[in-house]
Amino acid sequence: MSGAGFAVTFRRVTLPLIAPMRVSVFVLSFIGTLRDISTTILLASPGTRTLSLLMFEYATASRFESAAVIGIIIAVISLIVMWLAVRLGFKMGIER
């Protein structure tokens, strides 16, 4: 309304409004992807061993301690990503 073009309006109005939603969607997608085993089994090549597959292999081989350690590593990675997303979300919200 005051003469700003589409790009300026999008950058200064729309992006700050949708920034928290983008961070939330990223965190939910990341955590879901990190824990997904069935899709990884179907798509992974025989030489590929992701953390979720490694945890599954240890659990099926009755190596529960090793599987628990991998589970804790996955949880720590998830918490770090979530902490970074929260910090980024607050930073984006304050910079408006």
Image (tube, grey):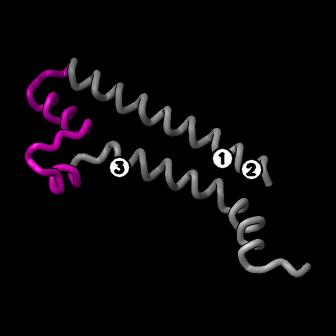
Mark 1 crowdedness (10 Å alpha carbons): few <14, some 14-19, many ≥20: some
Q: How crowded is mark 2: few (under 14 residues within 10 Å), some or many (20 or more)?
A: some
Q: Mark 2 sits on what residue?
A: 93
Q: Mark 1 points at which residue?
A: 89
Queried whether the magenta region covers residue 41, the answer comes back as: yes
Secondary element type, mark 3: helix
Q: Mark 2–mark 1 contact, CB under 8 Å? A: yes
Picture quarter containing residue 55? top left
Q: Nearer the viewer, mark 3 or mark 2?
A: 2
Element assignment for label 1: helix
Q: Residue at x 11, y 32 (%)?
A: 60
Name the residue nearer the viewer: 61 or 80: 80
Q: Is the magenta stretch mostly helix, strand or loop?
A: helix
Q: Earlier in the sequence, mark 1 or mark 3?
A: 3
Q: Left or right: 20 with respect to 62?
A: right
Q: Do the residues labelled 1 and 3 touch (CB within 8 Å)?
A: no
**What percent of the width, then of the height, locates residue 50?**
23, 40
| Placement of 14 over or under 84, stated as above or below | below
Which residue is label 3 attached to? 33
Total label count? 3
Measuring 61% from the left and 57% from the top, which residue is drawn there?
A: 21
Give the quarter of the figure containing the C terminus.
bottom right
The residue at the point 71 percent across, 44 percent down is 91
Q: Give the range drawn in magenta.
A: 38-64
Say few, some or many: other residues with alpha carbon within 10 Å of mark 3 (under 14 / 14 to 19 / 20 or more).
Answer: few
Q: Is residue 17 above or below residue 55?
A: below
The relative height of residue 66 versus residue 10 in the rendered view (above or below) is above
